[in-house]
Amino acid sequence: MVYIWEPGVNKVREEILSALRDAGGVVSGQRLCEDFGVSRAAISKHVRELRKLGYEIESVPRLGHRLVSSTDLPIEIEVSRYLKTSTIGRHYVFEKEMPSTNSFLGNLAVSKCHDGMVVVADRQTGGRGRMQRTWHSPAGVNLYFSVLLQPPKSPSEIPELALVAAWAVVRAMNAVAPTVDAGVKWPNDVLVGGLKLAGILCEMQAETDVIHKVILGIGLNVNLTRKQVPADLRRRATSLRMETGDVLSRPRVMGEILNSLEKGYRRWLKDGLGSFLPELEERSVLTGKKVRVKTFGKRIEGVVAGMSADGGLVLKEGRKKRTVYSGEVTLVRPRAG
């Protein structure tokens, strides 16, 4: 089932939930009927729908309903409590399971797209990253979502958004998990201690100089435990829970990322990627290190000297510098002996 939120949609359900939250105890069914102008049958239906979303609501005959605990699903009702955005996240689609949030938006008719639309899945069956790699996407622990943007920019500038999104994720981590020292790995990863915390996939649909859709896919490991990580990924992946020892609220983390992303997106539209370079350089995990970049069938080695204002990775090879704009980056380990 797909849950779509826009201002006014499911308003009664949200008001019932708010009333149960604010009461801190049992609220009579009669009072809910009178407050919201609906029947007891309608109240019961809304309560059932909230339970399906993971809310624990106790119903006591002849007394009423009591909210016992809230859901950790990153659904619109919960995420909107933390949103401070004007555009991003104001059209919101949630589904418990789908093949890929990027594919969902990629296949959506342009007439049904909205700038800032967000699509979220609790589990992806076909999650993917760059180079068509599979993204491990178990239910109940992480965030998997895509944001649709329609910027008035040229297609050549769009790859810069992957770095803007990485900046936004790191900035959000400062708010929700300040002890986590997250860094940016060009072009699209967020790492902690050399282990991947988040990945970003930027895709575009355009004709010549007309952009129809930019889709920013973000996968963030939130409450994933070491046991839940496949054996072949344990030396490469981490999560906020593994780094902090705490279980975090996924709706709050989601809200902070969307807030940060909208600020970054607006700044990018106005000032370009160059305005982010000092912060990206400060958080870069590659600067000063020797790397090998596999791009277009070639392998280029050099010491990372920084990033360019148009999103490239600047490599120093002896006295020469060159900039690469795409590719797979690996560290070059010093030879023993």
Image (tube, rainbow, N blue to C red):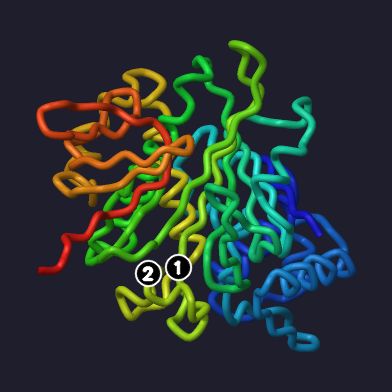
Determine the residue positioned at 37% across, 69% down: 240
Nearest the viewer among 35 and 240 is 240
Instruction: Please name the residue that numbered disc 1 is placed on.
Output: 222
Q: Which element type, helix, strand or loop, lies under badge 1?
A: loop
Q: CA distance from mark 1 to mark 2?
A: 5 Å
Tag 2 residue: 240
Mark 1 surroundings: few (<14), some (14-19) or many (≥20) residues within 10 A: many
Q: Residues within 10 Å of mark 2 (few under 14, many from 20)?
A: many
As helix, strand or loop, the secondary structure at mark 2 comes to helix
Task: Find out whether the residues at labels 1 and 2 contact each other: C-beta distance under 8 Å.
Answer: yes
* Image-based side of 172 in relation to 18, left or right: left
Tag 1: amino acid: Val
Check the image and name the residue furthest to the bottom.
61
Q: Nearer the viewer, residue 86 or 256?
A: 256
Judged from this view, the residue extending furthest toward the front is 337
Which quadrant would the C terminus be assigned to in this image? bottom left
Query: What residue is shown at x 54% (from left), y 33% (from top)?
Result: 87
Three-letter amino acid code of the residue under disc 2: Leu
Q: Residue at x 39, y 62 (%)?
A: 197
